Image: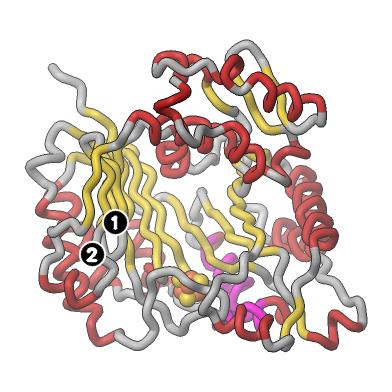
Amino acid sequence: MKKLRPLSLYIHIPFCQKKCDYCDFCSFDDIASQIPAYIDALCNEIKSYSDQCKPHTVQTIFFGGGTPSIISVKHMKKIFVALRSSFNFASDPEITIECNPNSITEEKLISYKNLGVSRISLGMQSCNEVVLKNLGRQHNSKDVANALALLSKLDFKNINIDLIYNVPVPKKMANAGMVRDIEAEVNHILLTAPHVTHVSAYSLIPEEGTPLKRKLDFEELYELGDDVAIDEELELQDVLKLHGFKRYEVSNWARPGFECKHNLAYWSGEMEYLGLGLSASGLFKNERYDNTDNMSMYLLNPDKVEKREPRKSKEIINEIIMLGLRTTKGVDLARLEKLGISLRKQKHREILHLTDHNLLKVSAKRIKASDEGFFILNMIIDRLTFDFIEEKI
Ligand code: SF4
């Protein structure tokens, strides 16, 4: 019998209680009345893939957003009915739902478990009230503690928490030299919630057009500066290591065996995945595609892909290098050689320069960023990817 090919699904739920000040994701806080129509459209899009996806087995599903936990139990059940009737599920798929601390309830979590959800990703970002306020989040530290206690009570075994560091501070705090004690903060979280198995930690990037960027422009908030941001990252690394977490990607840490399979599939660059929902993107049958980010268009034609492009070999090569460098495993040189690229030869000078500065580690099979290299990863990626790949092959 022919083996079914693995497939991952990303499902976008673009609704939030209120936009956070730093957010430029595709999410809305003023169209809750459209949720039922959106769920119907999403289910239609899911069903439209049913025939094409018969040779596949779904190994991971990730509900992101927006705030997936904002939708009702009834709507979530409806999505799962569409999913189970359209796809072959693996026997033990990893199914993650992103939840905000103030939108999960015992009823929702119990129903997630019954639906087969195996992983919760809690968008807590911090449990420091000042930081949460500066981010414009809707929850407070008590909501975080309650959510983590609820997840423990209901015996969820695989829990990610999202954290943000390098968060700008109000003028008064900046002038007083007050800094966030991120080490104490994360230590407290992990001592009180030892059931957390995974941490995603991102440095905040102020995006154009967001309220946070405007506050920076009008000097209501101040950026911390590179030194403080690096100190926060180092403190974060130390405390995560102390609690038994291992970095496996530039922004992701896990207890052994709890690396996110959905992320790993994506970073491998080899797995196919469908992006379902408004603004979602996918890679299927060697084509990249993007769904529309216009809600009215999506509701009218949920199974119409806005942009579809065959994957070019130069993109695949740069992707192997870029995604590989983001992980602690590094770039698989043999995979590049199969595509006619000898990274060691073609980037000889750059590699020598970066290894001389302890930014890169080179072995017979792999090239990877060092701990120091992870701080300037974008620069390393720039140097090791190809601008004009056709001429260089
Ligand atoms: S909860 Fe997430 S998606 Fe929603 S507004 Fe905040 S950052 Fe954006």
Extreme residue in the top direction: 364
Residue pointed to by mark 1: 115
Q: Is residue 297 above or below residue 308?
A: below
Whether residue 9 is visible, yes or no, is: yes
Q: Secondary structure at mark 2?
A: helix
Circle 1: residue type: Leu
Residue positioned 18% across, 56% down in the render: 305
Q: Is residue 87 left or right of residue 29?
A: left
N-terminal label among 2 and 1: 2
Q: Is residue 191 left or right of residue 101?
A: right
Q: Which residues are magenta?
A: 132-151
Residue 228 in magenta stretch: no
The one of 382 and 233 positioned closer to us in this rendering: 382
Residue positioned 24% across, 29% down in the render: 5
Image coordinates for residue 113, horizontal then vertical, percent: 36, 57
Magenta residues, dominant SS class: helix
Residue positioned 74% across, 60% down in the render: 186
Report how far apart the C-alphas of labels 2 and 1 lie in the structure: 7 Å
Residue 77's label in the rendered image is 2
Circle 2: residue type: Lys
Q: Are marks 2 and 1 in contact (CB under 8 Å)?
A: yes
Count of all numbered marks drawn on residues in the image: 2
Extreme residue in the front direction: 391
Q: Secondary structure at mark 1?
A: helix
The one of 229 and 71 positioned closer to us in this rendering: 229
Image coordinates for residue 313, horizontal then vertical, percent: 35, 29
